[in-house]
Amino acid sequence: MDQEISTGEIRQALREYLADHDSLAEIRAVADADPAAGMPPAFDPDVWHGLVADLGAAGLAVPVEHGGLGLGLQAVTGALHEAGQVLYPGPLRATLAAAAALAAVPAVGEVGGQVATALAAIAGGTAIAALAVPADDVSGGCGVSADGPLLRGTARAVPHGATADLLVAVATSAGRPALVLVSPADLATAARVLRAGTDFSCGYADITLDGVAGTMLCADPVVVSSVLDVAQLLTAAEQVGTAAGALSRTLGYLKVREQYGQLIGRYQAVQHRCADLAVHIEAASALVEMAAAAADAGDTGLLAQVALLARAAASEVSLSAADAMVHLHGGIGFTWEHEAHLFFRRARSAASWFGTVRQLRAEAARRDCFALITQSTPTGPLDAVNSLI
Amino acid sequence: MTLPAPAYSATGDGPPHDNGLGGVLGDELGRIRAVLSELERRFADSEPQAGPDRRVGLIEESGPGEPAAVARARALQRALFDAGLAWPQGPAELGGGGRSKEWSLALDQVLAEFRLPPRTQLLVGLDIVAPAVAEHGSRPLQERYLPALFRGEIIGCQLFSEPSSGSDLASARATARRDGDDWIVSGQKVWTSHGHVADVGELLVRTDPAAAKHAGLSMFLVAMTAPGVTVRPLRQMTGGAAFNEVFLDEVRVPDADRIGAPGSGWAVAKTSLRHEREAMMSGEGPLSPRILSLLGALVAGSALREDPVVGQQLAKITAGVLANRALAARAPADWGRLRDVAGSVTKLMLVEAIDLIGRLVAELSGPRVYLDEDDAFLWSQFVLSAPGLHIAGGTDEIQRNLIAQRGLGLPR
């Protein structure tokens, strides 16, 4: 490529597009829908189509030969930060995570052909993709067995499983996690049960693959593990965006709301709470950037350690930022009409999915993340830092 | 009280291989390693083998070994200067390297590979005073002081705080009145780290009592040996006494030693303070590779290293240190609205990590951390130093005020 598109340009394009297409209105449509009319779609398909067709968002990290932009995870995480900032409810993270998983698979033989077809469908906007990972653990399979000739089992609470056209799942094969692909034709035969989510915005579905044909993509534990790490990283990027969005909207209110004859943003207790959030947003953001740079440099070892730390930091700060958003708006922040509860719901929901803060940190410690800082000249992180400069 | 420095002790890790540094330092990496290796040999004999000097401290200390330590620091600084490694980002015409921030950060990493004596007593001059002179000083002032500071010929200290001006630094009362080509300075300064070994002080004084608070201040360089300057040591809660109170009684300071225009002292002070906060994340700061490698050894040798609660602590500490390193290396343009308060952000993250480490160390060592047996006593100074870092360079509360008001745009 002569002229690579910068992460800054990607972010700017998304920011402008999302500013013109109110994400919160899409979420409101779900939140305020009549329960008797059945589960409404989690997002506006026209807005999603624009993201894919006009901005190439679904194909950010899809190789150019399959119709994508061929960018790395630094661009992907940047885009997800923007999406998280406005609580965009469409299947951007789900699709990007599935695309990253497909792109990570060694593309040989028949598998290569299927992967190419799937990636082209994602980048071209003809397929929404979802990634089924274990919902409440940081490693292992999602509940689908790939031991027989056909896939069996249920992938529970798959984000955007409700509308996904193709599915990449971390199934179990011979007791170990393995990546499988369920094509649009096969996924059409699966039974889906939609799950209402507290955050209104992820289109969760239980997908039961009872004798559905699938393609075994890869059982290499290093690849499978990296795919999960990338899923953690993308979630973290979106969560940091959500935290930044919550803080930014809160700051706007603190600069106009008066009590005791002065702006409430002048009170030191209020200022310090915001300052602490800003510090921890930058910290989480730095970890996301470091993990993305490691992934783009092919350093899966560093990715495996830093992605979990990034996700833990992102979960924690998004919870704090959403708490602060409700609290600092006072009573109005506790109303249904106000947007604060949408941030609160998203933050709570996202931080509970695919590993809690405690689980993530425990796994990072088990992976000996501490060695990253105690070796007197840590190779990995500093390489990543250098590439960020 | 200002810049911390690592104790002169480390686990003996040999120099590693490329580590990706070649991408930044290029062909020079080999030459730099050869120079540092030679310096390591040259200074090896002077390494303290035992006793208080081996403890892991965060705040500068003084003691019987201080004159020798100062001489070592000066000698090392001179040798680094001669090898082009003392002032990488300085302008070439003044003896600096004319290098990028990236190059300088990479050099810090290479420096951390070698067991060199600490330059504790020089750091205030290098990291706090020099940037103010470089940014605000006249050309003759820069020529007179900057090369001398970076060659280790003169040691700088900071004369900002006063008994009644702590966090509210701009309320400084020390005065200077014009007398021909000189100024006559009187007042009292406090918390002056290394004032007792310094040759020159960066002095914040009120030159216009009629002007508004911030507009009435000016900055000077004052010779610490000038008549009327009295330095008295203050003992710290760590037991050491490396910071001082400084009395200024009708001290004559040439106008040529003014940094910046009269009335611009607050802008000069802000430059110094910003660099002070940012320098805390440098390779010689409290989270130096050496301190962290000692921490690694403590954890590796502990029966609690697989404990789940300890695991949570290790993950949090790792995340804090990694994030801080990445942010220290982040380009100013990438900070967005927090650009001017980047040092405040990293300083708050730093003290958070220091506190986490202090708790972990106490957890792993048990009562031995505060009893003089084995090596556990190494860490008592670390724990005792930590409160100082929450105060030095602007308290945590001041950093939060700065972030909220100058970064996030909340009203003053």
Image (cartoon, coloured by chain):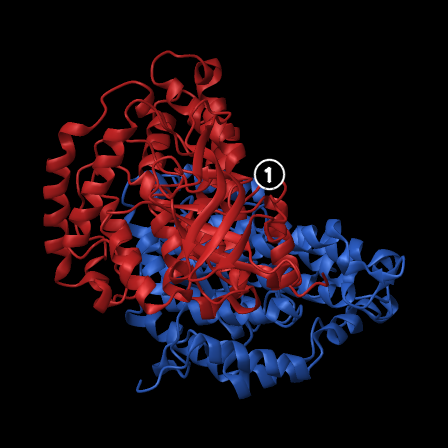
Chain colours: A blue, B red
Pick the residue in front: A153 or A352.
A352
* Left or right of residue A180, residue A218 in this image: left
* Left or right of residue B20, residue B3 in this image: right
Which chain does tag 1 point to? Answer: B
Pick the residue in front: A120 or B205.
B205
Q: Residue at x 71, y 56 (%)?
A: A322
Residue A177 appears anywhere in the view: no
Q: Residues within 10 Å of mark 1 (few under 14, many from 20)?
A: few
Q: Residue at x 60, y 38 (%)?
A: B163
In the image, is residue A317 above or below residue A166? above
Q: Position of residue B11 (x, y in %)?
A: 25, 30
Q: Report helix, strand or loop for mark 1.
A: loop
Q: Residue at x 22, y 69 (%)?
A: B93
Determine the image quadrant of residue B228: top left
Residue B354 appears anywhere in the view: yes
Pick the residue in front: B92 or A280.
B92
Determine the image quadrant of residue A42: bottom right
Q: Position of residue A170 (x, y in %)?
A: 47, 55
Name the residue at the front extreme.
Answer: B180
Total residue callouts: 1
Q: Position of residue A387 (x, y in %)?
A: 33, 64
Assign the C terminus of chain B to one quadrant of the image: bottom right
Q: Position of residue A124 (x, y in %)?
A: 48, 84
In the image, is residue A82 above or below residue A377? below
Amino acid beneath label 1 = Pro
| Mark 1, residue position | B163
Pick the residue in front: A137 or A165.
A137
